[in-house]
Image (cartoon, rainbow, N blue to C red):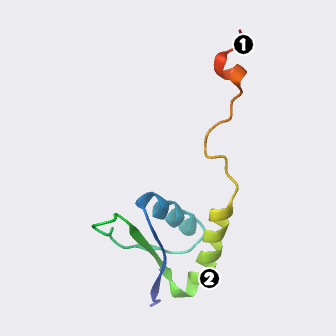
Amino acid sequence: MSDWVELMTGLIGEVTVVQSWLNANGIPTFVRDADPYTGNKTLLVPSSKLAQARHLLRLLATAPHDGGEEQTTSDEVMGDE
């Protein structure tokens, strides 16, 4: 049985995104219960997968993104008047 080690601690939304990304890439994860004072959760991975998990986390953190909002021009917002 593998030892589990801490990869990150963060808000539930942050931990959920990283957990999904790691699981999709074949890395098992475990999430500890939230801290009752901060609401933060801790994401754990097997120690044998820590280096791979850190690499994937770096890729996720540096991936280009547009904020999830569709870009529009002022003409599209106002209509073609």
> Residue 20: which numbered mark, if any?
none
Return the residue nearer the eye: 33 or 48.
33
Query: CA–CA distance between discs 2 and 1?
Result: 53 Å
Could you say whether the residue bearing mark 1 is in a helix, strand or loop? loop
**What residue sits right under mark 1 in the picture?**
80
* Residue 24 percent coordinates (x, y): 57, 65
* Residue 35 percent coordinates (x, y): 32, 69
User: At 50% from the left edge and 66% from the top edge, which residue is drawn?
Assistant: 19
Q: Is residue 79 above or below residue 66?
A: above
- Report the quarter where the C terminus lies: top right
> Residue 51: which numbered mark, if any?
2
User: At 60% from the left edge and 76% from the top edge, which residue is drawn?
Assistant: 54
* Residue 50 percent coordinates (x, y): 57, 82
Q: What is the total number of numbered labels drawn onto the structure image?
A: 2
Specify the amino acid type for callout 2: Ala
**Residue farthest to the top, as pictured:** 81
Q: Nearer the viewer, mark 2 or mark 1?
A: 1
Could you say whether the residue bearing mark 2 is in a helix, strand or loop? helix
Which quadrant of the figure has residue 42?
A: bottom left
Specify the amino acid type for callout 1: Asp
Residue 47 falls left or right of residue 35: right
